[in-house]
Every structure is written in structure tokens, then in C-alpha cells.
Image: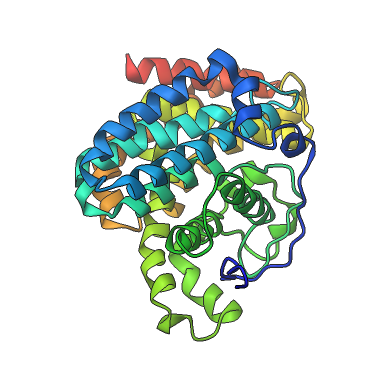
């Protein structure tokens, strides 16, 4: 009998083979050997997830699914820690292993406690865990959108697919989960206007438009005709919306965490642009990013696309809105008194001081 291959949904050409990080960490054993005691935060997070999801575990097959999910998420966590995190040499201030802890930890926990574990089937929760661990695996691909899906997202999906295979996910048994994960990772792309799309790096994309998840229908129309009669794909689309809401739920976290995330993303953007934060060349870009750019992202470009995401994080965003306005006005006033900033670090210092005043 021929082995059944995993279904092709979006059908992008394979362009992103394993890199040095993937070759160095080919499996979970290698990942755990690298992480050592550094795996403790992720292991603790997953123990909590197992407790919350326990009512959904009906049999050994369900328990095996959670085991596979933990293995795959651990491998994704270790690879990001090595590639762009604290265990490697190309540290990204925002897209590192701490981002995985945020998504799979506090944000997923809030969603679970808001809507209840019974609101979604076990496979959907596992897909969301894997999304949190794998959607940002690649951050250094040359920017190139294909039908709205970013290069980093396509590369991350290709690697995630290899992780699934390595960790024992089956093309037939786990078909619905695999489809949901592919669409969720594609949908996490932030839309960039066509005339500037080729100039944007990963951090720029976060501030350039809304999540593609809300516009996956035309992407599927272009790449897979007749998809609306495929129940697997139709069922996966609502989960892609929830995944996108988790990814951008920083807007609903405590204001101090939201502001710190904005600073980290700004630092990453300047690093990727090759601008030194202690140099004059970074002053205006940092001011634009932490000022009007952050305002535009929060008030114009961001929105929650699922009822679940809105229920879990909407109140937090509403509470942060006046604080962000106060931050923007306070930072501008502080810089106006001090005179034009001489570097990005000066802008960040004013930003931090103003945040401290607001949060008390």
C-alpha cells in the first residue's frame, strides 16, 4: 500500500531547506541536550497546559497526540532559542524563544480560561500550541510576498512540516491539525502595501498592516480552486483567526508588557536595518516607530478577528488605549523640552521614562 502523503493546501514551491540550526537540532533528543535546565520554563508551561486540557483526553490516542505536540513544540522552542534566541549568536530582541513562552503560556492560558477548554476540540488546541512554537521559526528570509504570504512564514511552515514528520505526526491521522497549522502560519503574515512590500523586514511587517488570516479566502481562491467544498479547510479557517489574535494579543496585555514589547520590536527593527541605536541615523526611525508607528498599529491596523480573541483580550486593549495616547503625548513633550534626539537610545530612554510615569 502506498504511503499517503500530507495534503498540499496552499501549494507554495519548496524554497527553504534545513539550515545549520535545523541540522544541529534534528530531533527532540538533540533539542533537550542543548536546552538542559533551560527547558524548565517551557516544561512548566506544558505541564500546566496538560492539566487544563486533561478533561479533553478520552483515550490513549489523545494522550499520544499531546505527547507528539509537546515533542514538536519543544523542538521548535529549542531551534528558535539557538537561531535567534539566548543560545545562539543572532539574538533578535522580539522574535526569540521568550515570544513562544508568551504565546503558549500567558496568552493561551488566558484564552483557555476565558472560553473554556471544551469550546474547541483537542486537535485545535494542539494546533494553537504548535502555532505558538513554530510560526516564527525563520526570521532572516529575504522579504518576498506570494499571494500575501510572507517569506518568513513560508519558511517557518516548511520547517514546521518537517518538525511534524520528525515527531511522529501522521499525514492521515493528523490531517486536520496539519491543515490548520499551515493556514494559521500563513495567516500570521501582516499585510504590506505592494509598493513597499519588498523593502520591509520582519519587524517592519508587524506595523505595516493587519493579519492576513482575515483575508485567507482570496488567497485560497488563487491557489486552490474549489476549497469551499473541502470541509477540512473550511474548519481550519476560524482557527487561523484565533491564532492571529493570540499572536497580536500584546495589545491586551498589561501596559508595561505591551510597551516593553514595542521597545524590543523597535530594537529588532533597527538591528535588521543595520542602524546603530547609539548613532544619529537611528533617532528619527526610532521616534517614528515608537510614536506614530505604534499608534497606527494599535488604533488603525490591529483588530481582533475572532469572538474568542476579542473575549479574551479585548478588554485589555480597551484599557491600554488611553495609556498609549498618554505615552505618545508624554514622550513627544519630553523630547520637545530636551531638544531633537541625537540617537535612537535617547528616544528609547524618553519612552521608558514616560512608560514608568504611566504605570506608576
Residue 318 visible to the viewer: no
Q: Nearer the viewer, residue 114 or 199?
A: 114
Q: Image check: 101 left or right of 303?
A: right
Number of numbered callouts drawn = 0
Q: Position of residue 303 (x, y in %)?
A: 38, 53
Q: Position of residue 238 (x, y in %)?
A: 36, 63
Q: Is residue 47 above or below residue 197?
A: above
Q: Quadrant of the C terminus?
A: top left
Q: Nearer the viewer, residue 90 or 63?
A: 63
Q: Tell me where residue 198 sits by quadrant.
A: bottom right
Q: Image check: 200 left or right of 28?
A: right
Q: Image check: 106 left or right of 340?
A: left
Q: Position of residue 137 (x, y in %)?
A: 62, 42
Q: Residue at x 75, y 53 (%)?
A: 16
Q: Nearer the viewer, residue 123 or 196?
A: 123
Q: Position of residue 53 (x, y in %)?
A: 27, 40
Q: Residue at x 78, y 42 (%)?
A: 19
Q: Quadrant of the N terminus?
A: bottom right
Which residue is outermost to the front?
Answer: 1
Q: How is the image coloured?
A: rainbow
Q: Tell me where residue 270 sits by quadrant.
A: top right
Q: Residue at x 54, y 48 (%)?
A: 168
Residue 195 visible to the viewer: yes
Q: Nearer the viewer, residue 61 or 27?
A: 61
Amino acid at each position: 500500500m502506498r504511503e499517503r502523503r500530507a495534503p498540499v493546501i496552499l501549494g507554495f514551491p519548496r524554497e527553504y531547506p534545513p539550515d545549520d540550526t535545523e541540522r544541529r537540532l534534528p530531533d527532540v533528543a538533540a533539542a533537550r541536550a542543548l536546552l538542559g535546565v533551560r527547558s524548565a520554563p517551557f516544561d512548566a508551561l506544558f505541564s500546566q497546559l496538560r492539566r487544563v486540557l486533561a478533561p479533553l483526553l478520552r483515550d490513549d490516542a489523545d494522550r499520544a497526540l499531546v505527547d507528539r505536540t509537546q515533542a514538536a513544540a519543544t523542538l521548535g522552542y529549542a531551534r528558535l532559542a539557538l537561531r535567534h534566541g539566548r543560545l545562539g549568536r543572532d539574538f533578535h530582541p522580539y522574535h526569540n524563544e521568550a515570544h513562544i513562552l508568551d504565546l503558549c503560556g500567558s496568552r493561551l492560558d488566558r484564552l483557555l480560561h476565558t472560553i473554556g477548554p471544551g469550546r474547541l476540540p483537542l486537535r485545535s488546541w494542539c494546533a494553537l500550541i504548535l502555532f505558538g512554537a513554530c510560526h516564527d521559526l525563520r526570521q532572516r528570509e529575504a522579504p518576498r510576498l506570494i499571494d500575501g504570504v510572507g517569506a518568513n512564514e513560508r519558511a517557518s511552515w516548511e520547517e514546521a512540516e518537517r518538525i511534524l514528520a520528525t515527531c511522529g505526526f501522521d499525514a492521515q491521522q493528523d490531517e486536520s491539525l496539519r491543515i490548520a497549522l499551515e493556514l494559521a502560519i500563513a495567516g500570521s503574515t501582516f499585510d504590506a502595501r505592494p509598493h513597499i512590500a519588498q523593502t520591509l523586514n520582519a519587524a517592519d511587517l508587524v506595523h505595516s498592516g493587519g493579519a492576513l488570516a482575515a483575508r485567507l479566502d482570496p488567497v485560497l481562491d488563487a491557489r486552490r480552486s474549489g476549497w469551499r467544498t473541502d470541509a477540512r479547510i473550511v474548519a481550519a479557517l476560524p482557527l487561523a483567526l484565533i491564532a492571529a489574535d493570540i499572536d497580536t494579543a500584546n495589545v491586551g496585555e498589561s501596559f508595561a508588557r505591551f510597551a516593553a514589547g514595542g521597545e524590543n520590536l523597535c530594537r529588532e527593527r533597527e538591528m535588521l536595518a543595520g542602524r546603530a541605536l547609539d548613532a544619529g541615523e537611528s533617532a528619527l526611525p526610532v521616534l517614528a516607530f515608537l510614536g506614530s508607528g505604534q499608534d497606527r498599529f494599535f488604533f488603525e491596523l490591529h483588530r481582533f478577528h475572532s469572538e474568542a480573541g476579542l473575549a479574551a483580550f479585548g478588554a485589555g486593549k480597551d484599557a491600554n488605549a488611553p495609556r498609549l495616547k498618554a505615552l505618545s503625548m508624554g514622550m513627544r513633550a519630553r523630547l520637545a523640552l530636551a531638544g531633537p534626539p541625537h540617537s535612537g537610545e535617547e528616544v528609547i530612554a524618553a519612552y521608558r521614562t514616560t512608560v514608568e510615569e504611566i504605570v506608576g
